[in-house]
Image: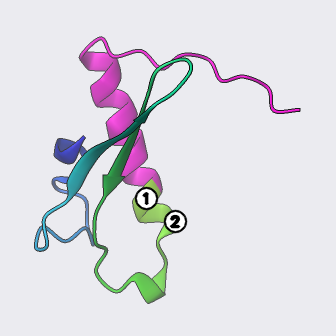
Amino acid sequence: MIDATQGIEHVLQDPAPAALLVSFGADGVNLELSFWIEDAARGMGGVKSQVNRVVWRLFCENGIEIPPTRNAR
C-alpha cells in the first residue's frame, strides 16, 4: 500500500507514509494507509482518490481481492 503513494504529486514522503493492519473484520482484515499531503488546505480529495486508485490497481495486479461489502441496514 505504501508503494501506492510513490510518485503522487503532493504526497509527502517525510514523514513517511504508513500502512497499518487496524483490525480483523467479519469478512477480512481492515487496513489503513496514512500519509501527509503537502498544502492540504488546497484540497485532499483528488490526492486521496489518486492514491486509492493506485492501491486498487496494485491489489488487482498482486491477486489481492476485496470481498463485496454487506448492505448496511
Most extreme residue toward the top, as rendered?
A: 63
Q: Which residues are magenta?
A: 49-73
Q: Quadrant of residue 4?
A: top left
Label 1 Cα neighbours within 10 Å, binned few <14 / some 14-19 / many ≥20 = some
Residue 63, x across and y down, in percent: 30, 11
Residue type at tag 1: Lys
The circle drawn on residue 48 is: 1
Q: Nearer the viewer, residue 49 or 31?
A: 31
Instruction: Report the disc number at residue 70.
Output: none
Q: Nearer the viewer, residue 57 or 28?
A: 28
> What residue sits 62% from the left and 17% below the top?
68
Q: Secondary structure at mark 2?
A: helix
Q: Which secondary structure, mark 1?
A: helix
Side (left or right) of 61 relative to 73: left
Q: Quadrant of residue 69?
A: top right
Q: Is residue 18 left or right of residue 52?
A: left
Number of the label disc, if any, that sits on residue 45:
2
Q: Residue at x 31, y 74 (%)?
A: 37
Quadrant of image for the C terminus: top right
Q: Position of residue 26 (x, y in %)?
A: 56, 20
- Asked whether the beta carbons under mark 1 and mark 2 sit within 8 Å of each other, the answer is yes
Q: What's the residue type where badge 2 is placed?
A: Gly
Position of 26 relative to 39 (above/below): above
Q: How many marks?
A: 2
Neighbourhood count class around disc 2 (C-alpha, 10 Å): few under 14, some 14–19, many 20 upward:
few
Residue 18 quadrant: bottom left
